Image (spheres, rainbow, N blue to C red):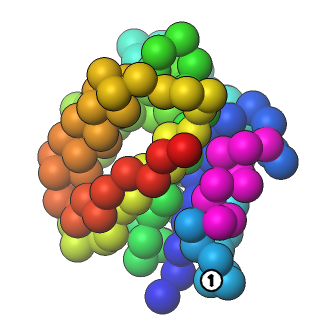
Amino acid sequence: MSILFINGSPNKNGNTVRLTKKFLKDQEFKTLNLVDYKIYSYGQNFEDDQLDEVIEQMKQADTIVIGSPLYWHSMSGAIRNVLDRFYGYVDECLLQGKDMYFVFQGYAPTKEQLVAGEYTMSRFAKLYGMNYKGMIAE
């Protein structure tokens, strides 16, 4: 079983990565750091956009772990861009049957922030046929 960790933090060795490693324990996984990719906002079309590369790696994984720090009461902009860009672009059956987890890390997140993150990610997983396995938060 292959696991892909999509790190939405600009920090490649920060708390989001630490929490993900703690969650995945001794399992092998591949890390995709969104900070290394050009993924433009919804509605923008540039030739050097790399969303397709991210989608291809998601297609190849059995399990997808999406991690984000808690910024300004929500997930990072890098994760938001990926979610926004999927809409109307990615076939809703493309990731069907894959397991998906959400790692949401922040300093003293409120109940409302956690509920909003959980809602967004569970809806995203459902829309694209993934099995949402839950949120890991700290």
Q: Seen in the image, is 92 located left or right of residue 112?
A: left
* 20 in the magenta segment: yes
Instruction: Write the start and end of the magenta stretch as one range.
Output: 14-22
The answer to whether residue 52 is visible is: no
Report the front residue among 55 and 99.
Answer: 99
Image x and y of residue 114, in percent: 36, 32
Above or below: residue 6 compared with residue 107: below
- For the stretch drawn in magenta, what is the main secondary structure? helix
Image x and y of residue 26, in percent: 67, 84
Q: Amino acid at mark 1?
A: Gln
Q: Seen in the image, is 42 located left or right of residue 50?
A: left
Q: Dividing the image into 4 quarters, which one contains the C terminus?
A: top right
Report the front residue among 13 and 50.
Answer: 13
Above or below: residue 62 compared with residue 100: below
Give the residue drawn at x 79%, y 42%. Answer: 14
Mark 1 highlights which residue?
A: 27
The answer to whether residue 71 is visible is: yes
Q: Residues within 10 Å of mark 1 (few under 14, many from 20)?
A: few
Image x and y of residue 46, in percent: 58, 21
Image x and y of residue 86, in percent: 34, 37
| Outermost residue to the bottom | 1
User: How many numbered marks, from 0 up?
Assistant: 1
Quarter of the image where one finds residue 28: bottom right
Above or below: residue 32 compared with residue 37: below
* 120 in the magenta segment: no
Give the residue drawn at x 48%, y 88%. Answer: 1
Q: Seen in the image, is 54 located left or right of residue 29?
A: left
Label 1: which secondary element: loop
